[in-house]
Amino acid sequence: MINIFIPSYHRAKNIKTAKYFIKNGYDPKKIHVFIDDETDDILEYQHETMKFDCNLHIFNMEESRERFDYIHRPSKLRRSAGQARNMFYDFAKELGIDFYLVIDDDTLQYEIKPFGIYTRGARIEDFINVFEGVQEFMQRQRIGVFGLSQTGDMFQVPDKKILRNKVMNTTFYDTRFIYRGERGVQDNDTSQFVGIMNEGYFTGSLSTGLALNPTSSATQEGGLTDIYNENKLLNKSLIIPIQFPSLCHAEKQKKNGGRLHHKIRYNHLLPKLIKVKGDRSNIAWDSYKEDMPFTNEPKRIK
C-alpha cells in the first residue's frame, strides 16, 4: 500500500480521510496526519490518531515560514495546507518513504464513476490497483507530481482525455523528482495546480478509475473555513492574480452572484506538447543529477 499524507487543521475529531481509508481496510500504519506546532488542539489530535492507530507528525510552523516563500494575508491564523506540503519532503526522507499520496483531511469517499456515470463506491482493491498504477506510470515516465481532478472538474463532459486543466485534492509525489516550495496561500488548490502545470508537471483524470466525492470546504468547520469566513473569500480571489499575473485575473462572476473571483487564462498557462516527426535525440530531463530533485525553496542569506 502507498503511504497517504494528510495535512489537517482544527479537525482533530473529524479527520474524515483517515477514518474513511481505515474503515475500508487500508493499513493505518500507511496513514500519516500532519499538523503544525502552533495549533491549539495537539492533544486532541494525539488522542484521535492513537484510537485509529495511524501516524501523527507535528511540523514547525516558524521553520516553514522561514524556509519557503509565503504570500502574506491579513489573517491572524496565517497558515495553509501548502506549508504542510512543503514540510512533507523532509518527513518522507526521514521515514524512508520514496513515494506518497497527499489527500485533504475532509474526504467523504471515492467512487467508481467511468465517464461520469456512477456505478458504486470504491473498495480497498480499487485503491490499491489505481494508486499503484499511478505510481508505476509516474516512475516509468519520470514524473515528480501527478494530480487527479475531483468529481466536478473531472467529468464535466464525458470523454477519454487524460490530461486535465485542474487538480484539487488528490496528488501523488515521487521524491526522486519532487516538487516543493509551494507558497503559503489561502487558495491552496488553485495555486497548486497552476504552479504545477506552469512548470511542466501534469494533472490528469482516470476515466475508468477513481473519482473523488469531496466535501465543500467553505461550509464545514475547521480547515481553512475560518479564514474564508474572516476574509469573505476576498483574498482567495486576489492571491492567485498576484501570484501568477500573466495567467490569472480577477473578475465579477455572474454565476457566483457577482462575487469577485479569479479566472485562469488556460492558453497562457502550461507548456504545450509539440509533435515531432522522425527520430528524436532529446536528452532525458533527469540526466544530470545535480539538477534534481526540483525545488523552488529560496536560498536565503542569514
Image (cartoon, helix red, strand yellow):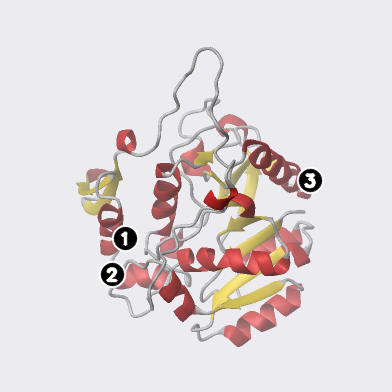
Mark 1 crowd level (few <14, some 14–19, many ≥20, 10 Å Cα) = many
In the picture, measured across the screen, residue 75 lies left or right of residue 55, that is left
Residue 149, compared with residue 186, is above or below; it is above
Residue 216: x and y, percent?
46, 57
Kindly identify which residue carries mark 3.
125
Give the residue type that dot 2 points to.
Asn
Kindly identify which residue carries mark 1.
236
For the residues marked 1 and 3, what is the alpha-carbon distance in whole angstroms? 37 Å
Q: In which quadrant is the C terminus drawn?
A: bottom left
In the picture, measured across the screen, residue 148 lies left or right of residue 93, that is left
Mark 2 crowd level (few <14, some 14–19, many ≥20, 10 Å Cα) = few
Give the residue type that dot 3 points to.
Glu
Q: Residue furthest top?
A: 278
Q: Do the CB atoms of the residues marked 1 and 2 lie less than 8 Å apart?
A: yes
Residue 259, compared with residue 231, is above or below; it is above
Of callouts 1 and 2, the N-terminal one: 2
Kindly identify which residue carries mark 2.
231
Give the residue type that dot 1 points to.
Lys
Q: For the residue labelled by badge 1, is the local secondary structure a helix, a strand or a loop?
A: helix
For the residues marked 1 and 2, what is the alpha-carbon distance in whole angstroms? 8 Å
Q: Of residues 6 and 198, which is closer to you in this image?
A: 198
Query: Which label was assigned to residue 83?
Result: none
Q: In which quadrant is the N terminus drawn?
A: bottom right
Q: Quadrant of residue 279?
A: top right
Residue 221, compared with residue 195, is above or below; it is below
Count of marks, rendered view: 3
Q: Which residue is located at x 55 percent, y 60 percent?
A: 104
